[in-house]
Structure formats: structure tokens, C-alpha cells
């Protein structure tokens, strides 16, 4: 039998993620483009994922679009909320996970996943940049670092600096003032991570934590932020191998399952 390919595209606020799945199980290719909805990011992520998989769009049997910009993708066969796609994606990697914390560029979500991988309940912060990737992006810029460098700085911290402001704008001023006092950058980075972790742990506690817990989204690539969250929650947090494309993975699985049902 010929291989069957499905595609999931997660159009986020800051990044576009596309993943191609072979026969519902194998990842043939994926791409993450650091430009989200309303940009060329979605189109570029599709082209790059197809090129990585070594196939053309004509070989794709079904496409699910998810994420903040999902309604802008006219080629989609199915449009599904990212909450459901995240639940499907994490269930495929860790079938026993019951709570997923997803921190993206402009929001953070705590998601309760059923034992069969369905969305059961969720709590979301999409009103305030604090506790999201945006907070880390702003702070990294002030520190003249790339977000991908935050984890290694955190690992070298000796004393975690307390960031008292919860508001991103005030916290930014606080970080600038700490820098002018020659505070160690690594200690400052650890304080920034703790600030995000405190907000996120509060969100997860509002949902109610059922273990095991996992983390997804671009911020899960930052092991400093992930470790800070573990410390705040006081329990282990699992990270899938490709946390930023968890939603796209769930979307591609959705396309595979619905393609079969609708045939
Ligand atoms: P969205 O779906 O809202 O576009 P993502 O889940 O793609 O968001 O996450 C984007 C965020 O992930 C960015 O704001 C940034 O803080 C963080 N991020 C992206 N790449 C990295 C990386 N290599 N290391 C650490 N953090 C990263």
C-alpha cells in the first residue's frame, strides 16, 4: 500500500509550525518559521516541511490548521482549536499525561487531557504578556541575549534575583535598573525565569494539577524556564522531544484520523 501523508499547521502569534506525518505515526518532516499569523511564515513553513519530507503538496491527503491564525489558512481541510491539537499531540508522546502547560509567544495555557487524549478543561492567560514567551523575548532583548541563550545563563546562576513587578513593562524597567547596579546577568535570568514560572504555576493551580504534567510551546525549549516551573510546582514536568511543534503534531494526527473516517 502507498504511504499516506497528512499535514498539521500551527499558525501561532509569533511562529508558524508545519509537520508532515506518514501513515499517522512517522514524522517525515517539519519546519518552524519565526513569523506567525499575517506574515509569509505559514506559507514558508509549509514549503520547508514539504522539502524536508521530500514530497509535494499533491501527495498530502489531508491538512488540519490550528493555532491563533488557523482561520487564515484557506488550504485546510479541518480547522481545529490549538487546545484540542495540543491534547492530541501530547497524548501521542506521553499517553499518561493529564496536565499540559503550553507557553507560547503571546499566551499561556494549562490544559487537562483525558485518558484518551481529548481536551477536558483548560485555563488560559491571553490578556497579559507576563508569564508568556513575550515576557522572555522582551527581557532577552534588554540583556542583549537571544532567547535560545537564556537556558545556559540560568544554569550558571548562583543567587536568583527577585523581580517584584508582575507587569512586563515595569519588570523591564526593574531589569534595566538591576543591570545598572551591576547585578550578575545569570542571576537576573534565573529571576526572570522564576517570574514566568510563578505566573504559570498559578495558572496551572487554577485548573487543578493532575499528574503527570508535561510542558509544550516554544518556551519549553528553554530548560531554565522548564526547571523553574518544576521548582514552583514541586513536581516533575516532562518535555516532549519537539515541544514547539506539539500542536502541529496533534493537528497532523487529527487529519490522519479524520481522513480515514471520512473515506
Ligand atoms: P506561538 O504559537 O504563540 O507563536 P510558540 O509556541 O511558537 O508561540 O513559542 C514562541 C516563543 O518561544 C517565543 O516567544 C520565545 O520566547 C520562545 N522560543 C522560541 N524559540 C526558542 C528557543 N530556541 N529557545 C528558547 N525559547 C524559544
Image: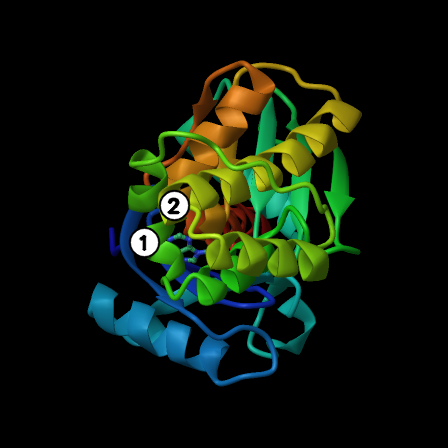
Q: Quadrant of the C terminus?
A: bottom right
Q: Residues within 10 Å of mark 1 (few under 14, many from 20)?
A: some
Q: Is residue 230 left or right of residue 73?
A: left
Q: Is residue 99 left or right of residue 47?
A: right
Q: Which residue is mark 2?
A: 184
Select label 1 or label 2 by which is in front: 2
- Identity of the residue drawn at 42% across and 52% down: 182
Q: Is residue 17 left or right of residue 81?
A: left
Which of the two residues, 191 or 133, is positioned nearer the viewer here?
191
The reply to whether residue 129 is in sight is no
Q: Quadrant of residue 61?
A: bottom left
Q: Position of residue 142 (x, y in %)?
A: 49, 65
Contact between labelled residues 2 and 1, with CB atoms less than 8 Å apart: no
- Identity of the residue drawn at 43% across and 71% down: 34
Numbered circle sitting on residue 262: none
Q: Position of residue 132 (x, y in %)?
A: 61, 51
Q: Secondary structure at mark 1?
A: helix
Q: Which residue is mark 1?
A: 149
Which of the two residues, 134 or 174, is positioned nearer the viewer here?
174
Amino acid at each position: 500500500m502507498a504511504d499516506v501523508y497528512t499535514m498539521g499547521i500551527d499558525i501561532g502569534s509569533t511562529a508558524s509550525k508545519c509537520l508532515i506525518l506518514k501513515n499517522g505515526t512517522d514524522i517525515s518532516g517539519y519546519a518552524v518559521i519565526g513569523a506567525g499569523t499575517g506574515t509569509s511564515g505559514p506559507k514558508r513553513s509549509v514549503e520547508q516541511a514539504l522539502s524536508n519530507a521530500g514530497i509535494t503538496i499533491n501527495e498530502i491527503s489531508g491538512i488540519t490548521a490550528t493555532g491563533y491564525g488557523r482561520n487564515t489558512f484557506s488550504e485546510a481541510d479541518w480547522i481545529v482549536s490549538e487546545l484540542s491539537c495540543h491534547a492530541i499531540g501530547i497524548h501521542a508522546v506521553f499517553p499518561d499525561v493529564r496536565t499540559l502547560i503550553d507557553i507560547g509567544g503571546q499566551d499561556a495555557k494549562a490544559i487537562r487531557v483525558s485518558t484518551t487524549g481529548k481536551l477536558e478543561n483548560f485555563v488560559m492567560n491571553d490578556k497579559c504578556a507576563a508569564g508568556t514567551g513575550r515576557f522572555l523575548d522582551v527581557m532577552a532583548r534588554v540583556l542583549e541575549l537571544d532567547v535560545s541563550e537564556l537556558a545556559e545563563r540560568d544554569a550558571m546562576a548562583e543567587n536568583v534575583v527577585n523581580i517584584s513587578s508582575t507587569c512586563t513593562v515595569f519588570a523591564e524597567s526593574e531589569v534595566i535598573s538591576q543591570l545598572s547596579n551591576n547585578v550578575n546577568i545569570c542571576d537576573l535570568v534565573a529571576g526572570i525565569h522564576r517570574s514566568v514560572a510563578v505566573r504559570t504555576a498559578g495558572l496551572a493551580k487554577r485548573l487543578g494539577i493532575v499528574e503527570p504534567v508535561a510542558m509544550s510551546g516554544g518556551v519549553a525549549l528553554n530548560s531554565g524556564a522548564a526547571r523553574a516551573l518544576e521548582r514552583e510546582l514541586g513536581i516533575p514536568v516532562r518535555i516532549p522531544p519537539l515541544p514547539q511543534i506539539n500542536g502541529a503534531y496533534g493537528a497532523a494526527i487529527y487529519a490522519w484520523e479524520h481522513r480515514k473516517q471520512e473515506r
